[in-house]
Structure formats: structure tokens, C-alpha cells
Amino acid sequence: MIKRAKAIVEVGDGSEIKALRWYQGESDTSKLNNAENSKGRLEKFVQNIRTDLNMPSLLILMVIIESADGPFKYKVIKRQKAFKMPNIVKVDSDGLGFNEDNVHLNTEAEVQLGKWLADAYLNNFA
């Protein structure tokens, strides 16, 4: 991801990175160790991305998961909602519809989430 992001900016056509959308995977909800360590791992992830891209104030739109069905789902969601770092805005995906697998968002939900993410960006960073 970092290589691709740097390559886009280095093309020299005026492209720039304005924000990162982070949608955490559901695997953290399946094991207690992953759920308990999710906050620290997310902090390190954000720090590493900002350092690697040399963008210490990179704006991050973080989607709060809803689609996971692991036994520690609500522990992870609670940690996501309490997560605090500068220039991070959380967008809650609660209430969106799923495909038949009950894990992935359906098309209408993806469109709605896109609108919420755009609004979050415009209301907080534009």
C-alpha cells in the first residue's frame, strides 16, 4: 500500500493524498487476544503509515465495523469508538445492509457508506 501511495504522488501530475479510509477487518473479533490488542495495533498502524508517507497529519476516515460476527465483536467496536488520535474521524457502519453472507455490505450499503465518508471528510477536513 505504501509503495503504491508513494508511486501515485511521485508521478508528478499534481496527484496528492488527501486522506486514508481505514475499514478494519473482522478478524480481530474472532480471538480475544486480537480484540484486546486491536487499539495498540491500530495506533501503531496509523503511526507507521504517517511516518512511511512522511505525512504526520494524514487525515484518516475510520469505519467502525458492524459486519463481524465473532464472539468479541462488541469489544472491538467499543475500542474503535473510544479510539483517539489527531486527524481521525470515525464513521459508524451500524445499520447498513449486508449481502447473503451477512459479512459484506450490499450495494446500497456501500453507496450509503460512501456518502457518509464523503460527508465526514467535507465536514471535518475540507
Image: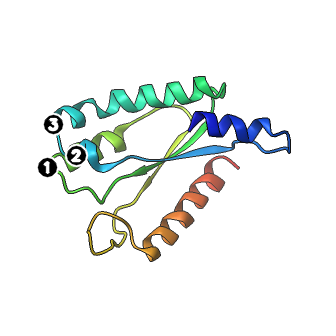
| Marks 2 and 3, how far apart at CA | 7 Å
Give the image's coloring scheme: rainbow
Secondary structure of the residue carrying tag 2 is helix
Label annotation for residue 32: 3
Q: Are marks 2 and 1 in contact (CB under 8 Å)?
A: yes
Q: Amino acid at mark 1?
A: Pro
Per the image, the residue denoted by label 1 is 71
Q: Are marks 3 and 1 in contact (CB under 8 Å)?
A: no
Who is closer to the viewer here, 11 or 72? 11
Residue 103 placement (x, y as % from top left): 29, 63
Rendered view: 106 above or below 13? below
Q: Sequence order check: which comes first, mark 3 or mark 1?
A: 3
* Mark 2 in CB contact with mark 3 (< 8 angstroms): no
Cα–Cα span, label 2 and label 1 = 6 Å
Tell me the residue at 43%/34% (across/down): 84
The amino acid type, in three-letter code, at marker 3 is Leu
Q: Which mark is residue 29?
A: 2
- Does dot 1 land on a helix, a strand or a loop? loop
